[in-house]
Amino acid sequence: MADPDLDTSFSQLKSFDCSELEDVEACQERWIEEAMKKLKCEEQDNLSAELFNGQTKAVLTRWIADARDIMCRQREVMENMKDIIGALKTEALGDKGRVIKLQDQLLERKEEQLKSLQFTVQNTVQTEIRGYSDAVKKNSGSVFSKEALTTVVKSVVAEEDRSKNLMLFGLAENEGEQLPAVVSEVLEVLDEKPLFEAFRVGRKGSCTTAIRPVKIILRSSTTAHQILTKSARLKLIEKLKAVYICPDRSSEERSARKLLVEGLKKVSLEQPHRRHYIRGGKVCSVDKDTDT
C-alpha cells in the first residue's frame, strides 16, 4: 500500500519549479542594481531613506510597484516551500516510527535466535552427557574427567557452527571464477539473498572433470534451514539440474549417510518396481504410482 504522506511530498517536490525561484531572485538583484546605479550607491547596505528622498515621484512609484510584484512572487514561492517542508517533516516522523518498529522486530528476532541457540546447546549437552553417563555406568573404572567435559563442549560448539553451513555440490568449477557471485546466482533462484562466505573444499586435482564442492558459511542456522527447504527447486532449472545443496555434516554423519546411500542403491536394484528414498535416517520404500 502506498504511503499517502510520501505521495504528497513527492508530488509537491515534482511540481515545484526551481526556475520560478531563480527568476524571482534575478528580479530582486536587477531592482537593487538599478536603485544603486540611479542613487550612485556603491554598497547595497548603504541604501538609505535619505538617498531615496532625492528621486522623483514617478521613479519612486515605479520602484515601489516593482518591489511589490517581487514580494508577492517571493511570498508565493515561500508558501510552496513551506508546504513541501511540512510534508517532508511529516514523512520524516513517519520514517522514524517505522525505523523504531523495525528495530523492535529485529530485537525480537535476535531474542528468538538466542533462545533457539540456547535450546540447541542445552539439548546437545544433555545428549552428550547422557552418552558419557551411560559409558561410566558400563565401566565403573571410568571417571567423568575434565577432558571428557571439554570434548562435550567442543562437540556442542562444532555442531552449532555446522548448523550455519551448507555444502554445494555439482557447481561447475572454472579458472579464475568469481565464486561469491556464482553462488549468489544459485541462491537467488531460491529467492534468498543472505550474507555469506563461500570457498571450494579440498585440493584441486589434476583431473579436469573433478568438481570440488563449495562450502557456504551463513550468519544463522535459520537462514541455512530456509535454503535447504527450497533447494529442490534447483532441479527445475536446466543449467542447475546437477547442483544440489545439503547440510554440512560431521565425519560421523557423513559415514552414516554413506551407509544409507549404499543401502538405498542396493534396495533399488533388488526392488526396481518400488520407489525408494531416505527419510529420518532410514531407507523407506513405497509402491510406485501406476498410470491407468
Image (cartoon, rainbow, N blue to C red):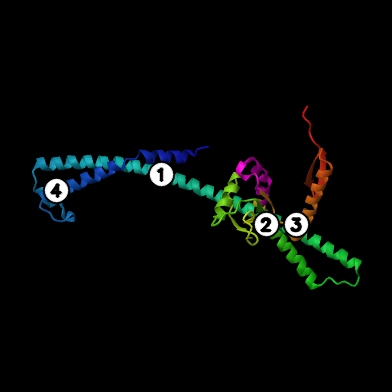
Q: Earlier in the sequence, mark 3 or mark 4?
A: 4
Q: Say which amino acid is labelled 3.
A: Arg
Q: Is residue 127 above or below residue 55?
A: below
Q: Say which amino acid is labelled 4.
A: Ala
Q: Which of marks 4 and 2 is nearer the N terminus?
A: 4
Distance from Cα at disc 4 to Cα at disc 2? 74 Å
Residue under label 3, please give it.
254
Graded by Cα atoms within 10 Å as few (under 14), some (14 to 19) or many (20 or more), the crowding at tag 1 reads: few
Tell me if residue 265 can be seen: yes
Distance from Cα at disc 1 to Cα at disc 4? 36 Å
Helix, strand or loop status at disc 4: helix
* Quadrant of residue 254 within the rendered picture: bottom right
Helix, strand or loop status at disc 2: helix
* Quadrant of residue 139 within the rendered picture: bottom right
Q: Residue at x 61, y 58 (%)?
A: 199
Q: Which of marks 1 and 3 is nearer the N terminus?
A: 1
Helix, strand or loop status at disc 3: helix
Q: Report whether 27 appears left or right of 226.
A: left
Graded by Cα atoms within 10 Å as few (under 14), some (14 to 19) or many (20 or more), the crowding at tag 4 reads: some
For the stretch drawn in magenta, the main secondary structure is helix
Residue under label 1, please give it.
86
Residue under label 2, please give it.
114
Q: Does the magenta stretch include residue 135?
A: no
Q: In which quarter of the image is the C terminus?
A: top right
Image spot of residue 176 (x, y percent): 54, 57
